Image (cartoon, grey):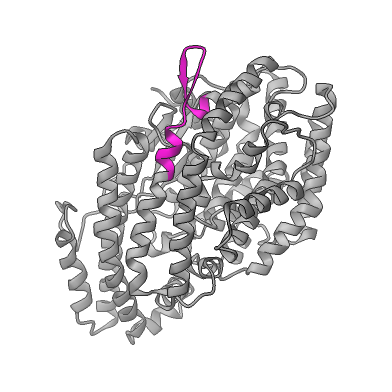
């Protein structure tokens, strides 16, 4: 496959200086000696200390990459039990035994007299701040609980991946089935929505049971660490040094006050065009003017080729990143049976070249997912040469700034996929409307999770009541769910983050506000905005979040006033389309 005006980077796996180049992680004993070496080593000078840090960083990178490949392979084929077993082995046999050593090494780090010299450097201040928080939270009794949680949460992917439907003689993944919800024939949409709903109903109890297990174990983790609930524990564990629970609550309220009325206005216009008094749930994705769904590409290869060409027009470095990943086979883009749902960019810390996984079926949403994950990938490349693995452990507010900014920065180049002005503008309009409509969903999921863990002993009935109440607060009231009330009440079960990465969701909202700022700047001075974007990404996590946002030329701000200013900006851009 030929790409225009791009080149492959010559990526060489760094030569190991501490860990054996032929290490095979097939038992705890295969890695234990390295941890014991680090723990027992005498550190007599600043040079010894830096060498010790470097060796520890190398070991971390190797282990994290090994775990990453196990997860990637398992999610590509959830039907292969050997792949699932390989991942389970790591999270149950390796990770729990690493944790006590990491705690001891963290204590050795902060107790070293040589640490004080490095800690005065801002880069190391951020790392040491996180280490001190980890020490504060560590409990031996939580090691096994974290292993059990990792094993339990992976069941979500297997349950979701098995949710296929049969339509007109063809077995469809939920991603492929969802394409029919854009069909202009209402009979088709209704039938497919009914089939999707019937299939989802079969797993409602299984998802409720799984969440109950996760809630109980997570609450115990919090209690063990001295917290009243998992919400407060998780705020600390996720390193949310730069904002608080009350800031999250203000974000929730701001979205209800500012964004929900705007989304209702957008939906009302669509409803008027449809000529209906209320949407039915299968009407939400159809074009109100009866136009066929946007289909920017047919295959994952076409998606990749077009994205590389788009990125090349924005910045040739961006296209080189994707071309290199393709050359190294670090991409799996097409949807297929047995593949876990969703999409992700998984950093691989030793080689420094990440892996993109997604379920492309030819939709506009897939194009957005590709550029989103591409933004994450570029972040990995820009920060790959940083000195320590710990510098690359990104807070989500920073990671998602990279990806969501790329969604918006790439919009002007979507001509690569749309040859007509009409479809190009339509795709941009969809993107901006989705940007607005996603904020209430993000806030709803986050507020729901706050409630789940502060009220961890709630019943399923109380959980349903809470979700329904939030749906009313964040919804537009324009959708008639008669006959599908249960589907609306269990919509949270489709949110992977609730099960696999609790509380990792509001970051999308915070980063979306930042991304709008990056895009706004690009419309005023594109080259400067791109340079600021790259400068921020190169920092990885060597500065505070506000400092990183400042480097990108934007504010770390999610107050009502700031949200209103950005919402007005989007509305102005929509009016131009």
Nearer to the camera, 216 or 383: 216
Question: In what quadrant of the picture does the N terminus appear?
Answer: top left
Nearer to the camera, 481 or 205: 205
Residue 402: where, in percent of width, then height? 55, 49
In this rendering, the answer to whether 22 lies above or below 301 is below
Residue 473: where, in percent of width, then height? 76, 50
Asked whether the viewer can see residue 320, the reply is: no
Q: Residue at x 64, y 68 (%)?
A: 245
Q: Residue at x 14, y 62 (%)?
A: 29
Whether residue 170 is in magenta: the answer is yes
Q: Which residues are magenta?
A: 156-176
Residue 14: where, in percent of width, then height? 26, 53
Question: In what quadrant of the picture does the C terminus appear?
Answer: top right
Q: Residue at x 47, y 39 (%)?
A: 343
Q: Residue at x 50, y 19 (%)?
A: 298
Q: Looking at this view, name the residue that lies furthest to the top.
A: 169
Is 460 on the left or on the right of 483, as rendered? left
Q: How many marks?
A: 0
Whether residue 86 is in magenta: the answer is no
Residue 136: where, in percent of width, then height? 43, 78
In this rendering, the answer to whether 468 lies above or below 304 is below
In this rendering, the answer to whether 257 lies above or below 479 is below
């Amino acid at each position: 496959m030929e790409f225009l005006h791009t080149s492959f980077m010559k990526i060489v796996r760094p030569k190991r200086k501490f860990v054996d180049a032929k290490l095979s992680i097939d038992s705890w004993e295969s890695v234990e000696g390295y941890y014991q070496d680090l723990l027992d080593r005498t550190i007599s000078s600043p040079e010894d200390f830096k060498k010790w840090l470097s060796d520890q960083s190398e070991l971390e990178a190797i282990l994290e990459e090994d775990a990453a490949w196990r997860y990637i392979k398992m999610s590509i084929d959830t039907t292969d039990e050997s792949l699932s077993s390989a991942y389970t082995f790591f999270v149950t046999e390796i990770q729990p035994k690493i944790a006590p050593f990491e705690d001891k090494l963290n204590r050795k780090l902060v107790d070293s007299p040589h640490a004080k010299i490095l800690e005065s450097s801002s880069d190391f201040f951020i790392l040491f701040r996180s280490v001190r928080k980890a020490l504060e939270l560590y409990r031996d009794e939580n090691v096994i609980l974290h292993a059990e949680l990792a094993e339990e949460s992976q069941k979500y992917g297997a349950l979701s991946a098995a949710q296929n439907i049969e339509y007109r003689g063809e077995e469809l993944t939920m991603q492929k089935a969802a394409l029919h919800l854009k069909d202009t024939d209402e009979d088709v949409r209704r039938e497919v929505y009914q089939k999707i709903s019937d299939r989802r109903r079969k797993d409602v109890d299984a998802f409720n049971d799984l969440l109950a297990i996760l809630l109980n174990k997570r609450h115990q983790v919090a209690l063990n660490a001295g917290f009243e609930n998992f919400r407060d524990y998780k705020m600390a564990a996720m390193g949310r040094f730069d904002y608080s629970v009350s800031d999250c609550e203000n974000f929730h309220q701001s979205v209800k006050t500012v964004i929900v009325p705007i989304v209702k206005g957008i939906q009302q216009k669509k409803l008027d065009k449809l000529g209906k008094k209320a949407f039915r749930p299968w009407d939400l994705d159809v074009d109100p003017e009866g136009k066929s769904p946007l289909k920017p590409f047919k295959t994952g290869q076409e998606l990749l080729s077009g994205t590389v060409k788009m990125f090349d027009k924005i910045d040739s470095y961006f296209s080189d990143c994707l071309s290199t990943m393709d050359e190294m086979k670090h991409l799996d883009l097409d949807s297929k049976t047995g593949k876990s749902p969703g999409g992700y960019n998984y950093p691989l810390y030793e080689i420094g070249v990440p892996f993109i996984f997604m379920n492309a079926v030819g939709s506009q949403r897939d194009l957005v997912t590709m550029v989103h994950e591409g933004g994450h990938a570029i972040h990995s490349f820009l920060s790959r040469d940083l000195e320590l693995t710990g510098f690359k452990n990104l807070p989500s507010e920073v990671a998602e700034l990279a990806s969501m900014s790329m969604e918006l920065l790439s919009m002007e180049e979507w001509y690569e996929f749309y040859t007509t002005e009409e479809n190009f503008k339509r795709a941009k309009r969809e993107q901006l409307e989705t940007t607005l409509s996603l904020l209430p969903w993000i806030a709803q999921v986050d507020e729901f999770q706050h409630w789940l863990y502060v009220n961890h002993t709630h019943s399923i009935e109380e959980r349903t009541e809470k979700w329904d109440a939030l749906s009313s607060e964040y919804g537009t009231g324009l959708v008639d769910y008669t006959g599908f009330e249960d589907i609306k009440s269990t919509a949270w079960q489709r949110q992977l983050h609730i099960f696999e990465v609790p509380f990792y969701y509001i970051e999308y909202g915070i980063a979306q506000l930042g991304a709008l700022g990056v895009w706004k700047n690009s419309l005023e001075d594109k080259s400067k905005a791109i340079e600021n974007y790259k400068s921020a990404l190169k920092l990885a996590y060597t500065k505070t979040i506000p400092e990183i946002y400042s480097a990108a030329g934007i504010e770390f701000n999610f107050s009502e006033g700031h949200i209103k200013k950005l919402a007005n900006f989007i509305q102005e851009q929509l009016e131009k389309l």
